Image (cartoon, rainbow, N blue to C red):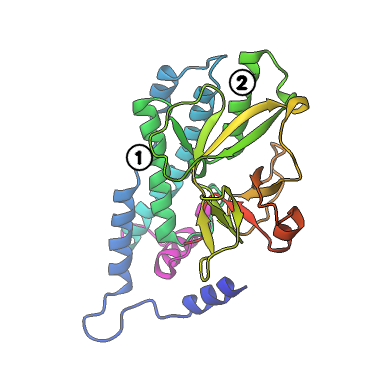
Amino acid sequence: EAMRILRTANSLMPKTGGGEGGRSKDTILAEATEKFLGELKKPFDTEYVEANYPVDYNESMNTVLNQELLRFNKLIVRVRSTLVDVGKAVKGLVVMSPELEEVANGILENMMPGVWKKVSYPSLKPIVSYVGDLAARLKFLQDWIDKGAPVTFWLSGFFFTQSFLTGQLQNYARKTKMEIDTLVWNYKVLPAVEQKFQKPETGCLVYGIFMDGARWDDIDGCIAESFPKVLFCEMPHLHLTPCESSKDPTDKKTVYPSPVYKTSERKGTLSTTGHSTNFVMTVLLPMAKTHNEKYWVKRGVACLTQLDD
């Protein structure tokens, strides 16, 4: 509600600089489009990647990578083409269509245009932060292509996070000859000071999760009250380990089932894949003996894969 009011107030601000020497709207658009295009790489060469990361029965991450590149390519083409056309429209080379005008207004008001949202992953970031976030995701995938699968996976960097999680379960199921439907995740929060990681024998290491409504106490190894005036807490790396549900050793009374969302909006729609467009998974986090699940539910504690800034 507060952010909506601020966005409305921002949209009423003048689009040009005031006083002598202020930059014109056209100048701002020309500089912004050039800057954004410089930050965003061109579409991935999917044929090259498919040749180097072919479909492999024992390595589902190859399929995950190729599918992610296809999704991001669609987004890259949309973003880059509209930015190029806005730059041309400023120079009078093309007509400023309603679609391009929406992108131009988004640049001037620092808001993500709807024409990008249609082909984008969920995000509430302003356009400047969104472009930076998109560039970081593209770099994560490019490093994966150049250096092989990473030891630690940036959970926030995936377009469709559920495909990565399913792929990891699939690898374990095929390795152990188990049915994937019988597997659940076990969660272990690693010490924040630990920086040098090695690929685990089972499961995967992930990072890029933020806690909203509470914080992670690295000393006691449990959820704790937030510090004053601190809204979010970045979680340390997590080790996700597949486990047969019938043999799950987790004591449900000592952990808080924290939902993980892609954005702070905490709501989404059911897509054709059967997954929510916002909800990712439920992470079981240890609680102090003095707290119970209801205590943290009342505080609305949840985890996010990205912030709004």
Q: Residue at x 29, y 62 (%)?
A: 30
Residue 172's disc is 2
Left or right of 294 in this view: 94: left
Local crowd at mark 1 within 10 Å, few (<14), some, or many (≥20)?
few
Most common secondary structure along the magenta stretch: helix
Q: Secondary structure at mark 2?
A: helix
Query: Which quadrant would the N terminus be assigned to in this image?
Result: bottom right
SS assignment at label 1? loop
The count of marks equals: 2
Q: Tell me if residue 79 comes above or below residue 23 in the rendering.
A: above
Magenta residues, start to end: 92-117
Give the residue pinned by disc 1.
42
The verdict on residue 266 being magenta is no
Residue 180 placement: quadrant: top right
Mark 2 to mark 1 CA distance (whole Å)? 34 Å
Instruction: Answer with left or right where residue 94 lies relative to residue 240.
Output: left
| In front: label 2 or label 1 | 2
- Asked whether 76 or 175 is in front, the reply is 175
Q: Position of residue 152 (x, y in %)?
A: 45, 34
User: At label 1, which amino acid type do we have?
Assistant: Lys
Q: Residue at x 73, y 60 (%)?
A: 295
